[in-house]
Image (spheres, grey):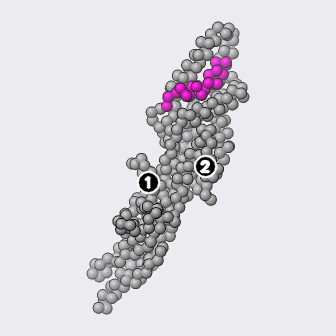
Amino acid sequence: MAILTLALAACGSSKKTNKSGSEASDIAFKVNSGEYVTITKYDETDEKTYLKLNVTVQNKSKNEIPVNSSNFSLYGSKDDEKIDSVYVNPPDEESFKELSGSISPEKKASGDLFYPVNKEEKYELHYQPRIYDDKGEKHKELVVSVDPSKYKNDSENAKKAVAAYVDQVFLSNDNPDFKSLLTNDVLADSQKFDEELANQLKEGFGEFTPSMRLEKMFIEKYRNALNKKIEPTYKIAYGDSKQAKINVSFKNFDTSDLYKQSRKVSEQFAKKNQNKYSYKEYKKAQEDALNYTFSRIDQIMNNTSLKDDSREYALILKEADGKWTIQKTDQDMNSEYDDLLKAFVLQTY
């Protein structure tokens, strides 16, 4: 009888439970924090959102114990159906810590667990320690309650922030979200985009210098054509409360067709003015033709077909104080920002 009593004590018969932690004489675990994570897996097309729970297991015994995510199960309060943890491929090593390995005597280990949940439902997280008594009986489960409604889900705001940025900077489309969601200097970035468009115009003129009036007209019409034709879509590759990776995709202009449409406008000018210029006025005729062509950039782009395929541009964001910052430099590990910018600055000559 005494031996049986000791065995039961070793298996945690003195268990006590509270809302965030559960404890027995030899082992304990608690939920430290939670947040929502949205991902699109590499072999899937749909975004999926999971509740990430950071847990700590404390080994209070004198023996080493193994631990991994399979020791945990989530149960819903409505149907008591078991929910297994899901593996999430992180964008970097800091995104989550895998709970695996073993815990030395009187030490702790922490890690993250991911579960698909209904935010309106209540759950119980069960931990089954891999400890057995002398008769091979399992240790009693430790249980804590989980309320998904109290945890933060901000990844959708990261997607809205990127959409607002693209609207304001590239598409001349007013989006009220950028003021509340973004820290980036949208005005400065928009001006930089205008400068890139102006450079494109000047390169198209070669040795000629386009007028300020034409430059302003070109930029305005170019932006309006982008806004009319380009319809970006946004997908969360990874998003939690502090960082996100948003994929931007759209069908870009077919550059070969863009060239053809530009040639058509140039030929229209030539046909209308075939007897206007003398041989000595060749440079003047060429400059006027370029002016005519670039002043009709909206017509050219509106008549240009889009490519059948679309490319994804991955933008990395960081969150602080409720706002998101799009990382734009190679140092920020976001070199695809430049690729996105270049995609909007098409070669029109």
Point out the residue furthest to the bottom here. 2
Q: Residue at x 62, y 12 (%)?
A: 272
Magenta stretch encompasses residue 288: yes
Report which residue position mark 2 lands on. 177
Whether residue 321 is visible, yes or no, is yes
Report which residue position mark 1 lands on. 48
Q: Residue at x 58, y 20 (%)?
A: 265
Report x, y in % for residue 250.
Answer: 50, 38
Mark 1 crowdedness (10 Å alpha carbons): few <14, some 14-19, many ≥20: some
The label on residue 341 is none
Report x, y in % for residue 262.
Answer: 57, 22
Point out the residue furthest to the left here. 135
Callouts 2 and 1 close, C-beta under 8 Å: no
Q: Nearer the viewer, residue 102 or 51?
A: 51
Give above or below for 309 relative to 16. above
Q: Secondary structure at mark 1?
A: strand
Give above or below for 346 relative to 104. above
Kind of residue at badge 2: Asp
Magenta stretch encompasses residue 74: no
332 vs 59, left or right, is right
Region in magenta: 287-306
Give above or below for 196 relative to 248. above
Report x, y in % for residue 255.
Answer: 52, 28
Closer to the N terminus: mark 2 or mark 1?
A: 1
Q: Secondary structure at mark 2?
A: helix
Q: Where's the N terminus, which quadrant?
A: bottom left
